[in-house]
Amino acid sequence: MTAALSLLGPVGFPWYACWVLPFLAVRPVMPLPWLTALLPLYELRFVFEDAGCPDIFFHWIVAAQFAPVWLGLACLGWGRWRRGPA
């Protein structure tokens, strides 16, 4: 539930992932730890803003940060759906 709130929220600040980490220690869901590895990409926002091209960050870096997690969760959900009810 915490991961869903973090991923579906209108903003994607890296410190919101801190709420997910304690739950991953108890019940790991594989694509979610990838987010912790990709969170440092958020710091590139300041580099691109200083360079005068923040659009690169918002169009490409944000996608590179969240797309692998969403794709991994979609694949995980697809696999569970294909297996059917347990």
Image (cartoon, grey):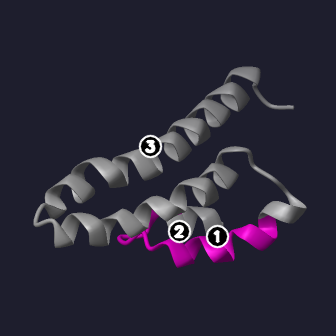
Q: Which residues are magenta?
A: 7-23
Who's the residue at 60% across and 70% down the image? 17
Which quadrant of the figure has residue 81? top right
Which amino acid does the dot numbered 3 rest on?
Answer: Ala
Who's the residue at 53% across and 68% down the image? 6
Q: Does the magenta stretch mainly form a helix, a strand or a loop?
A: helix
Residue at the spot of label 2 = 6
Which quadrant of the figure has residue 10? bottom left
Kindly identify which numbered label has been placed on residue 67: 3
Whole-angstrom CA distance, mark 1 to mark 2, is 6 Å
x then y, percent, for residue 34: 63, 49
Magenta stretch containing residue 35, yes or no?
Answer: no
Would residue 79 appear left or right of 52 to someone viewing this image? right
Q: Is residue 84 above or below residue 9?
A: above
Within 10 Å of disc 2 (Cα), the crowding (few <14, some 14-19, many 20+) is some
Which amino acid does the dot numbered 2 rest on?
Answer: Ser
Residue at the spot of label 1 = 2
